Amino acid sequence: MAQPLLSVEGLKTWFETEEGTVRAVDGVSFNIARGETMALLGESGCGKSICALSLLQLVPQPAGRIVAGEVRLNSQNVLQLPEREMRKVRGRRISMIFQEPQTSLNPVMTIGNQIREALPDAAELSASQVRARTQELLAAVGIADPARRYDEYPHQLSGGMKQRVMIAMALAAKPDLLIADEPTTAVDVTIQAQVLSLLKDLQADTGMAILLITHDLGVVATMADRVAVMYAGHIVESATRKELFSDPQHPYTRKLFRAIPSAAKRGGTLEVIPGSVPSLRQTFQGCRFVDRCEHAFDRCRQQEPSWHMRSGRGVRCHLYDVEPGTERRERPPVAVAAARTAPDTRQASTSTLLKVEDLKVYFPIYRGVFRRVVGHVKAVDGVSFEIPTGHTLALVGESGCGKTTVGKGILQLVKPTAGSVTFDGKTLNALAPAQLRPLRHRFQVVFQDPFASLDPRMLVGDILDEGMRALGVGGGRHARRQRVEELLDQVGLPAEAQYRYPHEFSGGQRQRISIARALSVEPELIVCDEPTSALDVSVQAQILNLLKDLQDRLGLSYLFITHDLSVVAYLAHEVAVMYLGRIVESGHVSDVLDNPKHPYTRALLSAVPSIEEKTQRRVIRLEGDIPSPIEPPRGCHFHPRCPEAMAQCRESYPRAAHFSASHKACCFLYQER
């Protein structure tokens, strides 16, 4: 076999804290060949990013230290290099793309100057040569008009363009290995498709290897040649992408696959992984997954499993121990169980709880000392929809299209410029604040980031009690305390959780607390603003099961704001697709997702990575970025990016064409109908 480009053997990276030693990476080994993409897959907290930082000797100091192992790049152990020599490795031989480009780019330096710093031979080139080389890199990563972008600052670029700049910086020195740490987690599916396609094209051109760190199985299916599954500081399974997706071996890997939401699981319950990743401060005796494994037996608790190689793939599990005189059939079955599904029995409601008609939310743009209004940001520009009692409407679209502003307009957290929001027969935006206040307990919100939305200085019990006291619901103090315990039980948390602070919980548990806070005042409508976008697939399954169960038991209605179409397929009844402040297509979830009519909807769906090869679609590439809502394009707002645009699309906005009682789309392709 050819010698690997990168060989990692027995890598251990530990952190010394006041509570003890955290064994973040505890004996990791893997190889990456030239030109290969290997994905490092696992939940948050399992050690993926620390493993990547260890390869570059960038472990946070002074707490972190690499205590054992070898990292060989072209047979050279880079862990033995002094800092001066290591600087020649970073950026030149191994480059890294970080998860959040907004915090990785210097806000006070132009894009050109930041890329110039990454050029290894910048000191030997003239200013004009440096500028030309930098513009070549910008053009190579698909940024239009690189001469103009060279002199712009990060805040002038979209999220997708900032990520492209990060890729350009990483490629400036033509590295042998590119480490991509969750490069698409914070971007929309269309931008994600662009970034992944760009990485594959650049890899084909340069022959570099890629170490892709992610928790998204769809991204792994799109990009990876081989996959290593990481859990609690260990790699528990390694295989080619095809082997892993067709026959996952480790119980943890199989659980991850079963937790993915999809239309096929609609009406059923997503399988969840009970508990959470164990603390890495402890010394493990047996298998690290034992407390969450449905196949665990006595040996799993007493002895750490060995690494078993079978037909070129590896797995760390006692299910594959073969001893003299022991038959495999005595072990628990390892075949992947079918997902638990059931028909969707939720009945259509005849009563409309929420009705939004021609909602507009404009934000004025002020200029000068006297704050003259010189224009408006048309965040929401004429949105209409209805949500029946006990139903879920999913609002989907790219970042910046106005989804969150619609939610705030419904909740009257921002004042609508025009239109009406009618809740149970009452027009909310026509009510005075004193009239609106008694109704507020009937509609609540769950925000995207539970850590930012919970007061870190308040106990969980006080957080849940606060809303009831403020809105005068829940009775007296004793009754409210009982209600707090009921709420915690309702969202699957123990009663003693009320005496702890938010930072003492995991991300999924904090989101459960946010849901409990919304439920505390007995609402009928909950606006869920990206409540699962920051969560791992296993935690996401828990939250989706909870939301569905609460809807079935309490008759709740949801406005579910998201860009994850697999979640939409599983949870929603209806879906509305937004683009630049307007709804371009809406209807029953099966109509829109199975038979999309608007070119933008088709582009969104084509960009969603699928774990099933047979459902992989041709990705429809959207050129450019979403236009500014300050000056929307004349005619159809989508026509500058639409692959099917016609002359009339540039002249006027299309009327809605109806395909069924609920399914409609605003597009000139269907106007003759």
Image (cartoon, helix red, strand yellow):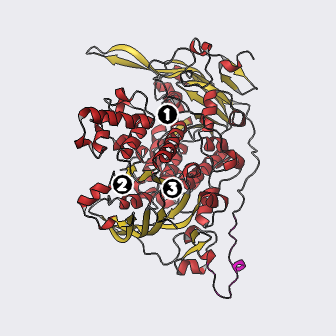
Q: Amino acid at mark 2?
A: Arg
Vertical comparison of 642 with 512: above or below: above
- Residue 63 placed where, x, y %? 29, 64
633 vs 408, nearest the viewer: 633
Among all residues in the image, which is located at the extreme top?
651
Q: Amino acid at mark 3?
A: Glu
Q: Nearer the viewer, mark 1 or mark 2?
A: 2
Image quarter of the C terminus = top right
Among all residues in the image, which is located at the extreme bottom?
325
Q: Amino acid at mark 1?
A: Ser
170 vs 290, nearest the viewer: 170
Using the rendered image of the protein, determine whether residue 84 is visible from the camera's viewpoint: yes
Secondary structure that dominates the magenta span = loop
Question: On the picture, is 365 further left or further right than 225?
Answer: left
Which numbered disc covers residue 93? 2
Q: Count neighbours of disc 2 (C-alpha within 10 A) and say few if under 14, some if 14 to 19, many if 20 or more.
A: some
Q: Secondary structure at mark 2?
A: loop
- Residue 202 placed where, x, y %? 47, 44
Residue located 65% across and 49% down the image: 549
- Residue 193 placed where, x, y %? 54, 40
Q: Nearer the viewer, mark 1 or mark 3?
A: 3
Q: Secondary structure at mark 1?
A: loop
Using the rendered image of the protein, determine whether residue 555 is visible from the camera's viewpoint: no
Residue located 51% across and 25% down the image: 435
Q: Quadrant of residue 236?
A: bottom right
| Magenta highlight range | 321-335
Question: On the picture, is 575 further left or further right than 23?
Answer: right
Read off the residue under disc 1: 399
162 vs 591, nearest the viewer: 162
